[in-house]
Image (cartoon, rainbow, N blue to C red):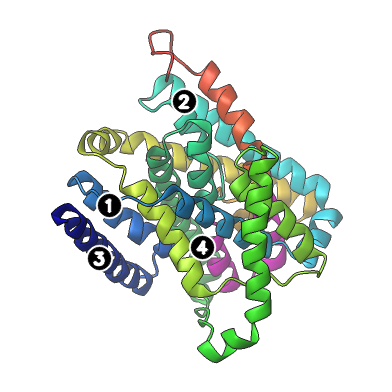
Amino acid sequence: MVNARGTIAQGAGLAGLSLVLVLALERAHVPAALLLGPMLVGILFGTRGSSVRVPRAAFLFAQAIVGCLIARSITADIVASVLRDWPAMLLVVLSTVVAGAVVAWLLGRFGSLPGSSAAWGSSPGGASAMVSMAEEFGADPRIVAFMQYARVVCVVVTAALVARFVNGDAAGPAAPVQAARPESLVGEALPILATLALAIGGGWLGRVLRVPAGGLLGPMILGAALHAGGLLDVTIPEPLLALSYACIGWYVGLRFTKPLLASLWRAVPQIVGASMVMIALGAVSAWLLIRLRHTDPLTAFLATTPGGIDSVAIIAVGTSVDVGFVMALQTLRVLVVILTGAPLARFIARTSRRPDAPAGR
């Protein structure tokens, strides 16, 4: 009884402190605050020996909601844009994915990070999806989360500086998205129920069919087809999305230990350096867009930044760029990264292992 009460008290503290930190991060306009806040608090509790754990079923459901969220970003306009400019887009996306794979291989071969985790952590896009999928394929989601969100911070800072340099004072943050009022949720009851059915049914189908990371890919693929075809208005209430991100953040953060955190802290120079190399290689892809498609430089740069799709969207809306093209290319890259993540991670883990490293590296 005492242990149960202690766990309940820790859970309440975890939730309360996470809420405070999320509000503080959002007020400071920090990207991915809904996931970063709970994950940071989870790390704090995990390194202090907390007994709180997120049930596996809750984590899988959160994965499914993230899959629905990705599906919701795939609209008919984005599909049309991809079909219209697919040669240039595919070349740029593949070059970015290959750049991430090369960086991951170098980290695994010459750095201090395990090859599989370096591969998922260096995947250029879909940070929350990469964290969710990593464990499915034997990588350490804690390392992946640390790498992904360190790069998101680097991308956001770099993109914001470039946008301000190109557009001057015209480059400002977009107006915040207003949360749906309770009365509006009543009118959206049917789409919300349909989205929940998509999350549960798609996740179940993906796992039954043994699709890699089917809990996420099942709802994503099925939902993308239905949403882009105008057959389903994927609707995720903000509280449910926040809770899903929190579950993923807690699931990852609570598993951190002091020795692991110390090891990752020593790897910060490698991770930041790798992030800046990927941003530079993305700039090369932007140059390709400028040459092949005559895209304006800022649109090309924002479209090719390696990750942080939500944050890039905010910067793009607040500047004079082709927002539709930016989001089309970012979305296409996220889809390619998710679909190629598993085979690339296995290849990198196998080929980057140093001769003196243990087999489990």
Query: Which secondary structure lies at badge 2?
Result: helix
Per the model, the C-alpha gap separating discs 2 and 4 is 28 Å
The residue at the point 34 percent across, 59 percent down is 38
**In terms of image quadrants, where is residue 9?**
bottom left
Residue 12, which numbered label?
3
List the residue tagged with mark 4.
311
Q: Earlier in the sequence, mark 4 or mark 3?
A: 3
Query: Which secondary structure lies at badge 1?
Result: loop
Q: Earlier in the sequence, mark 3 or mark 2?
A: 3
Q: Nearer the viewer, residue 129 or 300?
A: 129
Query: Which secondary structure lies at badge 3?
Result: helix
Give the percent coordinates (x, y) of residue 315: 53, 67
The residue mark sitting in front, 2 or 4, is: 2
Mark 4 burial class by Cα count in 10 Å: few <14, some 14-19, many 20+: many
The residue mark sitting in front, 4 or 3, is: 3
Per the model, the C-alpha gap separating discs 4 and 3 is 30 Å
Span highlighted in magenta in the image? 308-334
Per the model, the C-alpha gap separating discs 3 and 2 is 37 Å
The residue mark sitting in front, 4 or 1, is: 1
Q: Nearer the viewer, residue 203 or 46?
A: 203
Q: Give the position of the N terminus as an image quadrant.
A: bottom left
List the residue tagged with mark 1.
52
In the rendered view, tell whether residue 318 sits above or below residue 39: below
Q: Amino acid at mark 2?
A: Gly
Q: Earlier in the sequence, mark 2 or mark 4?
A: 2
Label pair 2/4, CB-CB below 8 angstroms: no
Q: Amino acid at mark 4?
A: Ser
Q: Earlier in the sequence, mark 3 or mark 1?
A: 3
Mark 1 burial class by Cα count in 10 Å: few <14, some 14-19, many 20+: many
Residue 115, which numbered label?
2
**In terms of image quadrants, where is residue 299?**
bottom right
